[in-house]
Image (tube, coloured by chain):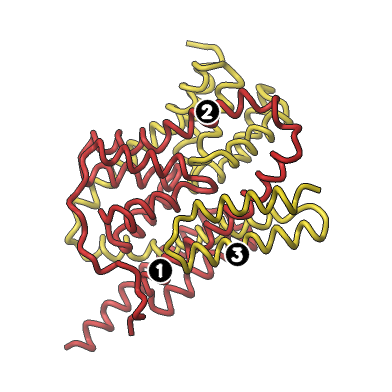
Amino acid sequence: MPKPSAPPAELPLNPPPGPAQLFAAFAKAGLMGFGGAQVWVRRALVEERRWMTERDYAEVLGLGQVLPGPNVGNAAVMIGRRFAGLAGSFAATGGLYLFPLIVLMSLVLLWQEFADIPAVAAFMHGLACAAAGMVIGNGLRMIGRLRPPPELIAIGILSTVAAAWFRVPLPIIVLVLGPISIAAVVWRARRGGEARA
Amino acid sequence: MTGPVWDLFLFFLKLSLVAVGGANAAVPSMHHEVVELRHWMTDAAFSQGYALASAAPGPNVLFVAVIGWHVAGWQGLAASLVGFLGPTFILAWAVAMLTQRLAGDARMGALRAGLVPVAIGLILATGLVTGAAAARGTETEMAVAVLITLASALFVWRSNLSPIWTLVAGGLLGLVLLGG
């Protein structure tokens, strides 16, 4: 039963963006992206600009996660391609990396100047805590909007525990839990089909 | 071709296609090659660069740019980034083409939907691991750190306001309470 306070997931999507809009959206997400640009890319594409549904985005991110390389970087390539072809992939990727790279290299060049100021270290410490919480809250938000069946929630919890607690290498988690999860999706779809029949 | 710029390019090119889980998962391999094997960077410079890349906005993968810059200046930066991101760009492009071509296929649908719980589970794990790493200092500071993390998670989960507010508030709380 859907909650009455369900976020605007049911609103219609906006028309697909061109390369310039993709660049702007990913540039903002990259620049804001403390503690993980993924949180900001999702917010921009799903909640603010409504170019993709929550499920669509989660599926692209899932693919980006199992491919080598940064998951959000892979998602940028795939999302860019879907909306605007090769130009879209380059625009999204460029937007995602360009400004953070400038900020980071400025920090590297300036770091010796202000690394010793205790206030800077204290601010960054608090920011790191908030960023970690933001990543957790974003994950919970995705679950709340996708409303997965119990077996998929169990697989998600297993992934979290394996990675965070037991530090199982990521390829092993994906290779073991990925097929189980896909099988669970197929099982659920078949069961749903029989129930309808 | 020889020289550090070419070596950087080749090293990150090879690392790129095995870096499932992104740059964070590949950091131990980078440390082994860059610090222990080739002595391109000191241990301290490596850790400091990683801390900066994590604290700065944007994807943590930009740490490879810091390594490249340390080793061979701006050319090294470009070589590292292109080496690390190039192959993954091409692979993601090919996979996107395949998934779009097979969009109506039930097996592709199951594959895409099946990877979602694992992806979200790993996102939560990233938050928990970085949150645990940020819970440091005296006992009071650890408690403050955990409270900031929990409050931030709750805010982003339940509110529709921009997460930037939780980051600003977290930084300011850190300034006041974690100054030691």
Q: Colour of chain B?
A: yellow
User: Label 2 to label 1, Cα distance in Å?
Assistant: 35 Å
Instruction: Give the image location of residue A73, x and y in percent.
Output: 40, 42
The C terminus of chain A - image quarter: bottom left
Q: Nearer the viewer, residue B177 or A60?
A: B177
Position of residue A180 in the picture relative to residue A104 (left or right) = left
Q: Which mark is residue A148?
A: none
Q: Quadrant of residue B127?
A: bottom right
**Mark 3 highlights which residue?**
B151
The residue under label 2 is B65
User: Badge 3: few (under 14), some or many (20 or more) residues near its Cα, within 10 Å?
Assistant: some
Chain letter of disc 2? B
Residue shown at 53%/57% (left/top)? A134
Of badges 2 and 3, nearer the viewer stands 3
Please give the chain letter of the residue carrying mark 1: A
Host chain of mark 3: B
The residue carrying mark 1 is A181
Q: Which type of secondary structure does the marked residue at label 1 adopt? A: helix
Locate residue A39, reporting x and y percent: 45, 53
In this view, A97 is above or below B97: above
Could you give the CA–CA distance between mark 3 and mark 1, rounded to whole angstroms?
Answer: 31 Å
Percent x, y for residue A175?
46, 58
Kind of residue indicated by mark 1: Ser
Q: Residue at x 39, y 41 (%)?
A: A28
Q: Residue at x 33, y 81 (%)?
A: A2
Q: Quadrant of residue A151?
A: bottom left
Is the residue at mark 3 from the same chain as the one at mark 1? no
The vertical placement of A156 against B81, above or below, is: below
Camera-side residue of B177 and A71: B177
